[in-house]
Amino acid sequence: MKNLSFGILCWMLFVSILSNAQIEITTPEEEEPEEEKQIDILPLQLVKTEVIAFANWSNTFRDLRPNSANDGLFGEPLGERANEANLNVWSYGLGIRSDLKNRFMWQGGISWLRNGETYQYDDPDTDSTFAYQTFYNYVAMPLKVMYRYGYRVRFYGGIGLVPQMFFSYRQEQQWTTVNNTQMDETVKTRNGFNSFVLSGTITAGIQLRFNKGSSIFIEPEYRLHLTNSFEEIDSYEHFGRAFGINMGFTYPIW
């Protein structure tokens, strides 16, 4: 009986030692992934400077009015141009975003920027039609100052100026004749436009880190010309307007 009791006691001690050994072995392995996770996923507030790339979809229009220069010497009535409508366009850009003090940050870069308008006319008497889509293309260098808030999810908003160098004008025309013949033409030029336009912009956005190296963002933006797009002696004064959304990603460099 004593031998049986002694054997049971030894067995219980063996099981206890084995259990403790297993706990000591598995505990470090369970803690390791959490430590690695904390090292890999860095909060946005620790990122000081990052490069950005984005695409912009915008619904664009214009403020068009008779030229008021020299007491309206060059101005003409808008005529059918008063019936122009909004045009959807795409723009693209690259830039750098960097922190300033007190939760402020600045953003600069270069972009391919577009504005435009469209027109559609249908003649019910002859069944003829005429339509066009006008594109104004610029190389722009936007500069913004924004206020940010957030940890791994960042909210921000701000204002900026967008210097724009005029690049080209393109108008896609389509028409149908009284004989139901469909035709089209592309008109391109670089004459008749100011070489430099200055715009103002207001933006707000949200940025989300999705791995240790980069993040994605989406930001609504309103943009408007502060200066006339056309030359001083043109019949009209033209100020582009755009409401759109920037969609892109960032990668930290410091």
Image (cartoon, rainbow, N blue to C red):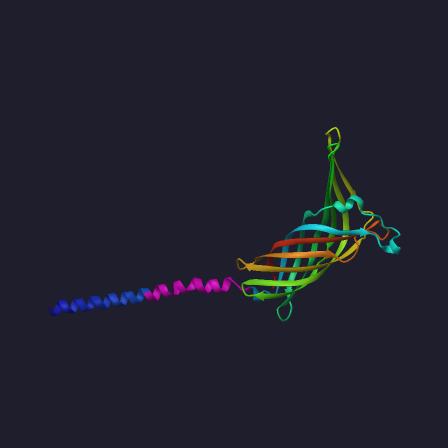
Tell me, yes or no, if residue 96 can be seen here. Answer: yes
Q: Quadrant of the C terminus?
A: bottom right
Residue 236 in the image: state x and y as whole percent. Answer: 82, 50
Left or right: residue 124 compared with residue 15: right
Residue 97 is one of the magenta-drawn residues: no
Say which quarter of the image contains residue 5. Answer: bottom left
Question: Residue drawn 86% across and 55% down?
Answer: 69
Q: Which residues are magenta?
A: 23-43
Tell me, yes or no, if residue 174 can be seen here. Answer: no
Residue 36 is one of the magenta-drawn residues: yes
Say which quarter of the image contains residue 196. Answer: bottom right
Q: Quadrant of the N terminus?
A: bottom left
Left or right: residue 240 compared with residue 214: right
Which sits in the foreground, 78 or 187?
Answer: 78
Q: Is residue 31 above or below residue 112?
A: below
Residue 201 in the image: state x and y as whole percent. Answer: 70, 59
Q: Residue furthest top?
A: 179
Q: Main SS of the magenta segment?
A: helix
Question: Residue drawn 26% across and 67% down?
Answer: 16
Residue 25 in the image: state x and y as whole percent. Answer: 35, 64
Which sits in the foreground, 144 or 15?
Answer: 144
Residue 96 in the image: state x and y as whole percent. Answer: 65, 60
Count the marks.
0
Q: Residue furthest front?
A: 125
